[in-house]
Image: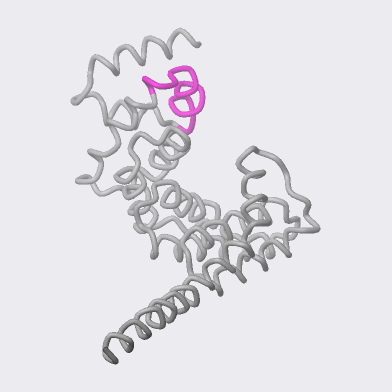
Amino acid sequence: MEKNKFVDYCYPVLVLLLGIALFLTALPRVRAALNHLPVTSAITELNKRKDLDLKKIDLLIATAQQSIALSDEPRYWADLSRLLFFQAEKANNLNFKRQSLKQARDSVEQSLVRSPANSLLWFQLAKLDFLLNTVSDKTVKALNLSIMTGPYELSHLLPRLQLCLSAFSKFDPKDRFLLPPQILIAWQKAPKVFIREIALKNGNMFKIRFLLHDKSPDDLAVMETEIEKTH
């Protein structure tokens, strides 16, 4: 009888202790999420192509850093990178601009370490290399990973293809198989934009011919006919 009373008493205490433990475990994440609300709102505005108040950007960056200190989430690192990139875009001082771009790149890397299957962030990492004039084999690897994790991501398909063609000489021949399908997807989804923004810029058509002449000669012929019509 006494044993049953003991069990009846201990069970709710154990449940209470487990509940407290779970609450304490989740508390930093809850605090981080609440702390991060202004940053989330700012990123939403940027996604709508709206400007942020430059007077608030330092505070938003500090807030994102506080969120990371509370909970080391990949999204918080990605948001921090976005804010730093915005700060760099608006900077007039070249040294400050470059410093912000470097910090943005570091933040993207931190996010990717924690969540590597993010096509957009791999593209952004490569883009930051171009902006910092530090294009290397790592840049090409980032572009390859962006394609492999999101081959049909239309939001950054065209600018990613532009970077790939700009860095074409650095691509290992064995990795070039990734590029023809990207060219064809871009061509099929937005032919006019493809011609204007990709094919007719930076000598890209020579590279496109090289990539398609064996694998997709019919598509290449149609493409060249349409390009001729624009002249």
**Is residue 165 placed above or below 18 in the rendered structure?**
above
Residue 41 placed where, x, y %?
66, 50
Q: Quadrant of the N terminus?
A: bottom left
Q: In the shown orientation, is residue 29 left or right of residue 117?
A: right
Queried whether the magenta region covers residue 195, the answer comes back as yes
Q: Residue at x 65, y 52 (%)?
A: 86
**Is residue 138 placed above or below 21 in the rendered structure?**
above
Report which quarter residue 112 is drawn in: bottom left
Q: In the shown orientation, is residue 212 left or right of residue 85?
A: left
Query: Please, which residue is most extreme toward the front here?
Result: 1
Q: How many marks?
A: 0
Q: Residue at x 35, y 41 (%)?
A: 150
Report which quarter residue 179 is drawn in: top left
Residue 53 placed where, x, y %?
78, 51
Q: Relative to the observer, which residue lies in front, 201 or 123? A: 123
Query: Please, which residue is most extreme toward the top here?
Result: 229
Protein image colouring? one colour
Residue 97 placed where, x, y %?
67, 59
Residue 127 placed where, x, y %?
49, 49
Query: What is the span of residues highlighted in magenta in the rendered image?
Result: 187-202
Q: Residue at x 51, y 54 (%)?
A: 128
Q: Relative to the observer, which residue lies in front, 218 or 185? A: 185
**Is residue 208 placed above or below 134 in the rendered structure?**
above
Q: Residue at x 40, y 22 (%)?
A: 189
Q: In the shown orientation, is residue 217 left or right of residue 24?
A: left
Q: In the shown orientation, is residue 20 left or right of residue 220?
A: right
Queried whether the magenta region covers residue 13, the answer comes back as no
Q: Relative to the observer, which residue lies in front, 41 or 11? A: 11
Query: Please, which residue is most extreme toward the right here?
Result: 55
- Classified by dominant secondary structure, the portion drawn in magenta counts as helix
